Image (cartoon, helix red, strand yellow):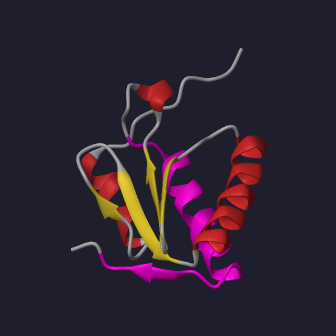
Amino acid sequence: MAEVPVPLSEDEIEAALREVPGWRREDDEISRAYSIRYHGGVAMIVHVADVERLISHHADIDLRWGRVRFAITTHDAGHKLTAADFDLARRIDAIAQAHQAEPLDES
């Protein structure tokens, strides 16, 4: 039986956010958007999905013309932030870099 993910404390979330610059917290979710051509965005999403399948953790993904956005929370922890969310964020950043996607400032 799989372990139930443990939500992070506020202090742990703040520390984890410092380790994933560019990711933005919105309540109990972290998100980041990238500029990338549409078909490049599709390829990037497939790459992310392959990794997500391997680690059994998934982001919500929004693909638009010239832009892809990822939003992450842990559904199995009651839609709270866990260490798995920040691990996936780091993985997405590496995949985005490999696909030459440019981070967008959503401020």
Res. 2 image quadrant: top right
- Give the x, y percent position of residue 93: 57, 72
Q: In which quarter of the image is the N terminus?
A: top right
Relative height, residue 41 to residue 82 (above, below): below
Q: Is residue 75 left or right of residue 42?
A: left
Tell me the magenta residue range: 81-105
> Residue at the spot x=38%, y=67% of the render?
23
Q: Residue furthest top?
A: 1
What is the chief secondary structure element of the magenta stretch? helix
Q: Which residue is drawn at 78% across and 44% down?
A: 54
Q: Quadrant of the C terminus?
A: bottom left
Query: In which quarter of the view is residue 56 placed?
Result: top right
**Is residue 59 on the magenta stretch?**
no
Give the residue drawn at x 49%, y 75%.
Answer: 66
Residue 102: in magenta span: yes
Q: In which quarter of the image is residue 91?
A: bottom right
